[in-house]
Amino acid sequence: MEKEAILELRNIRKVFDKTVALDSVSFSLYPGEIHGLLGGNGAGKTTLMNILYGLYRKDEGEINFHGKKLNIQGPRDAIDNKIGMVHQHFLQIGNYTVLENIVLGTNVSHPGSMDLSAEAEKLADLGKRFFLPVEPNAVVDTLPVGTRQKVEILKALYRGVEVLILDEPTTNLTPQEVDDLFDSLRVIVNEGRSIVFITHKLREVLHVCDRITVLREGRNITSLTRAEASEDIFIRAMVGDQMEIEGSVYFSHAKMANVAANESATPALEMKNVGLKTKEGISRLTDLNFQIKQGEIFGVAGVAGNGQRELAECVTGVVLPSEGSILMHGKDVTALPVNELLKQGVAYIPEDRLHDGFLPKANVAQNLILGYHRQKPYYEHGLIKWNTVYDKVRGYISEYNIKTNGPEDPGGNLSGGNIQRVMIARAFSMDANLLVAHNPTRGLDIPSMDFVYNKMLDHKKSGSSTLLISEDLDELLLISDRIAVLYRGQILGILDRKDFDKYAIGRLMSGIRAEETADLRAAS
Amino acid sequence: MTIVRKTVPYLIAIIASFAAAGIFIALTGANVFQAYETILITSFRTPNGFVQTLLKFIPLTLQALAFTIPLTAGKFNMGGEGQMIVGAIAASAVGIVGADLPAIVLLPLVILAGVVAGALWGFIPAYLLYKFNINEILTSMLLNFVSFQIIDLVATGVWRDPVAGHPTTVQIGAGGFLPMLIKNPPLNAGLILALLVAAGVYIYTSRTAGGYELIATGANPRAASVFGINVKRMFVFSIVLAGGIAGLSGVIEVAGVQHRLIVGLQHNFLVLGVIIALIAKGNNLAVPFVAFFIAILEVGASAMQRTMNVPVEMVFIVEALVLLFVLLSDVVRRR
């Protein structure tokens, strides 16, 4: 059954400055299919789809839609041709209601009175058909991420799209929400629409996609149907030949080499009733109690914005908790400032690398010593020993594979992934005994992620501890010894590695406590 | 290689600005080439011309540094002029009150008083920034006007020199004079102070941990504070240090050049300091070189006015155009 492709992208090429983002990439989409676009960071997936959606102009190549050549100048053209895209960062107006956001930019039936009852009806109908229930009069700002994503998908369906592009749609969803999303997607394509599903998560594509195209470094690697596919083929396609898969943590099916944490020693970190309130008195963290043992990787899961950043900043001394105390190796460090904590062996990889961790106007060497510039071997008698710094920095540049012209290259020349490598190199440069890592692998390609995991496991083996705060549940499941789930600034539960269960964590992530789940199970 | 690459845009900018300003000079009816010859040669033709240039170079360098140091931390000190005046007032006050003290006591006191007064004048906007987050551009600039009134008060009040035709104080004690490097034409030791300060600032910013913290603060204050640098303290420190350096330039005008306090001693130093700092793109090492170049233009321009009747303001056009073209060359290179 050779179906006719409704959409075809041929030999698309796109160059940013000197980097070739897409090199003669082709892609075709059949009606009624979910087509996975798979690849690591920087593979060109999003760039390709941004070209289709009109956000970027292509340098070369052509787009055929329904057999006709399509000239897309901007998102307006894409929307007029019934192509819709849901971005990773939602484009919504926070203080508008769901309904207002959805009708924004369309013709409404009563523009004078803004009586939207007809539109509300249409929306309710769409919600029912595609299992995307939302409250039309809720203000978008008050909604959780999972619901806001439903709004975004409804927005596209409301405009009658035939092709729906989803960019990393499962980021920040709980496993339950991911399942629900996949159900909805199936219904959407069953009515003849097509979906492009951009992701770097192999298991998701294998789960939901009919056909899968793999990109790597801006090139087509392979395109296969699910029936033809095996996990191994895709792994190889995603990472290329240079990566050693055997020793990889990222693709390991076996449980991580379990190095037992030191149970008897004093905990590396102890949080006692820690709470944090904003100036306005709003609670960001409430009554946090946990211990991180020496040699333990302690994961913190949760949907973004549930207090992760505040937790990281309390532990690293960036903000002072309003209640409770923090102990490191038995010593009270609650009131110590950041520079003292860094001296005592804390390392920090902040989530928002551009704002919280990086000096774009300073050079690579200056960036790599930030925070450690008053410590040996960089510092002596008030002076910075730049020769030593440069020697060290050259070592880090090659070890961490930072693509730069050298220690004196301005930070602003670095790409996002390379900036992240600088963050990681800096955090591991001082043999810290407590690493606070917040989304440490964001923006990294697979071999680099693997490198980071191996570094963290080495760190663990040497008896040091890690507070790993991540929005990537797979990452947490992969290398944590225990996982705590943060919800609205509270820890709803802490699971041991033997009890790890995606769905149990997912329930906690959406605010359902363990005893409540037990009740539910008993009731059903 | 990198030095060549960095200076070429400057040379092009200078040539382009001379060419553009030449049009205006021609419009005044003067001979363009003769005008430029006067501007560029005056400083080197006679010993007097060269010393005049050095005497301009001293306050220009210090004023420019008083702008670049806070700029390194990402802050704008628009109060260099006021800090200079207040420094000059304090130096004069000490020099007049302690007129009978021997040089070994009086001179250090004069210098110290001026530097501390300038630093204190810088501390006011710095503290307002630290405590209440009030924009330092506004406060430092407004304090200049306050200093104008104070200098008027001092120069027409108790210490007024009744024989002078211009608001001026009496002379400070001879013990407060800066020693002369050359007697005739007179060149005072302020030159050495200025060069030492410039070298010190360069070493401080490029070699010390404190200087590194200043740069990190300017590069991204949020990241600097997340990694343990007290950025608010760096802001205050940078503006206070700048105030002290501007105060020193006031001291040198009083103790080195005039030996008394004269109303109007600040000339155009604030604007020129900012122009020098921006042409140097905030690079502390480049500041003395740019300052010397601007000093040549300034001295040459007064000569041009004397000999050719071309208004001295013409050289402002050149200076402004140099800055404009240097900034433009950045944009062009990025394309």
Image (cartoon, rainbow, N blue to C red):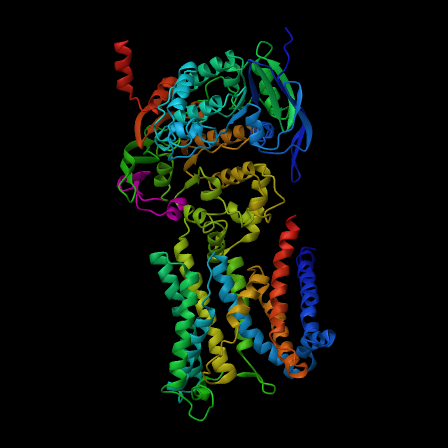
**Residue at 51% of width from left, 22% of height from top?**
A201
Q: Is there any visible trace of residue B303 in the rendered image?
A: yes
Given residues B169 and B195, the one toward you in this image is B169
Q: Is residue B222 above or below residue A195?
A: below
Given residues A177 and A277, the one toward you in this image is A177
Image spot of residue B153 (x, y percent): 38, 81
Q: Is residue A321 magenta?
A: yes
**Residue at 38% of width from left, 82% of height from top?**
B154
Image spot of residue B77 (x, y percent): 46, 63
Q: In the rendered view, does B44 fall on the left or right side of A399?
A: right
Given residues A433 and B137, the one toward you in this image is B137
Count the marks.
0
Q: In the rendered view, does B242 fall on the left or right side of B46?
A: left
**Residue at 58% of width from left, 24% of height from top?**
A81
Magenta range:
A319-343
Q: In the rendered view, does A399 fall on the left or right side of B110?
A: right
Q: Is residue A372 above or below residue B150?
A: above
* Res A25 quadrant in image: top right
Image spot of residue B146 (x, y percent): 39, 73
Q: Is residue A22 magenta?
A: no
Image spot of residue A221 (x, y percent): 65, 21
**Residue at 59% of width from left, 49% of height from top?**
A408
